[in-house]
Image: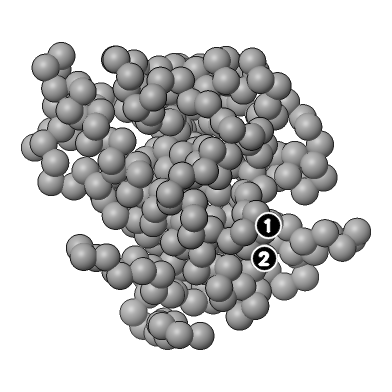
Amino acid sequence: MKKILLILAILLPAAIQAQNLAGTYIVAERDTCTLYLDHYTPDPGTSVLPDGKVKPTILYVFGGGFISGRRNDPFIMPWIKILNQNGYGVVSVDYRLGLKGVDMKFDLFNLIKSAKYTKRAVDMGVEDVFDAVAFIARNSEEMNVDPYNIVIAGSSAGAMIALSCELETCSPTERTAKLPEGFRFKGVMSFAGAIMSDTGIPSYGTAPSPQLLFHGTEDRIVNYNKMAFGRFGMFGSKSLVEKVFAKNGYTYCFYRYSGHSHDMASNMVPTWPEQKEFLETNVIKGVARTVDATVDDPAMPLWKNFTLNDLYKK
């Protein structure tokens, strides 16, 4: 395959060596950076169900406030290992960090400007993820990945990108033109995500694929409910479920973690049982199962709360 990079074990962090890393590939060349993806394969004999159905590949988009983060961060490796052991391949992708070096302020005089910057960063991320999907489609046989059997997942900023990718596949834009014909994600998994909109409440042209949403009720980074000003708004999991999904009869599974902040962006391992049920029932079996649960679990890891000003302070 063109542009494949041979990964030498001596150059890999120990956390990555333990995973089923099949290859790292160049996806696209940008003016500011080169975009890569890592492909982790499921454990042998685990990816096909007794009825012959093949489990989907998870396309993961990392978090970091659009200023930091990386596709192979050691903290996500235990989660990738769980996915691989349970028969799910993982493709972890790069995207441009659209807010890196941007002076973000959140007082009344700068909200609109910061909202515009954030929307632009999300749009850049969506374009880069669509390039990754197109790359997978072009190289599907060599990677042994079905491009029409992909669940997109994201954490924090990556969850915002993932949710927007699904929105755009349902309401096509110029960016979706590079996707394979008839492409749709099989599902979406959002860990503390939201949709950044410049046209008010998000609206889907066609019904979205099943959505799995985790969010802390006290999240002050990616708003649990919404933050709207003029035509701009950050619509978090609560507002998406109550104003869009439930209203239109879309399928979703929403876990509201009482008292939690932005920690739900990184609690992928503790929430694996809910992910497993979603993948097996909603995605693979195609059951229109809807869950809306408020969870008060003292065992769930909890962060000290912090704000957007804390995240973007110089």
Q: Kindly indicate the quadrant of the structure image that contains residue 256.
A: top right
Establish if 309 lies above or below 61.
above
- Secondary structure beneath label 1: loop
Question: Which amino acid type is marked by label 1?
Answer: Asn
Q: Mark 2 — residue?
A: 146
Residue plotted at (59% across, 33% down): 205
Expressed as whole percent of the image width and height from the top left, the position of residue 238 reads 51, 18
Badge 2 local density, few (<14 within 10 Å), some, or many (20+)? some
Expressed as whole percent of the image width and height from the top left, the position of residue 313 reads 13, 33
Establish if 151 lies above or below 8.
above
Of the pair 286 and 297, the residue shown nearer to us: 286
Residue furthest to the right: 51
Q: Kindly indicate the quadrant of the structure image that contains residue 149.
A: bottom right
Q: Mark 1 — residue?
A: 149
Quarter of the figure with the C terminus: top left
Residue plotted at (73% across, 26% down): 290
Expressed as whole percent of the image width and height from the top left, the position of residue 254 reads 61, 26
Residue plotted at (11% across, 17% down): 109
Expressed as whole percent of the image width and height from the top left, the position of residue 198 reads 34, 27
Establish if 70 lies above or below 287.
below
Task: Tell me if residue 105 can be seen.
Answer: yes
Task: Tell me if residue 295 can be seen.
Answer: no
Of the pair 57 and 121, the residue shown nearer to us: 121
Residue plotted at (58% across, 61% down): 180
- Secondary structure beneath label 2: loop
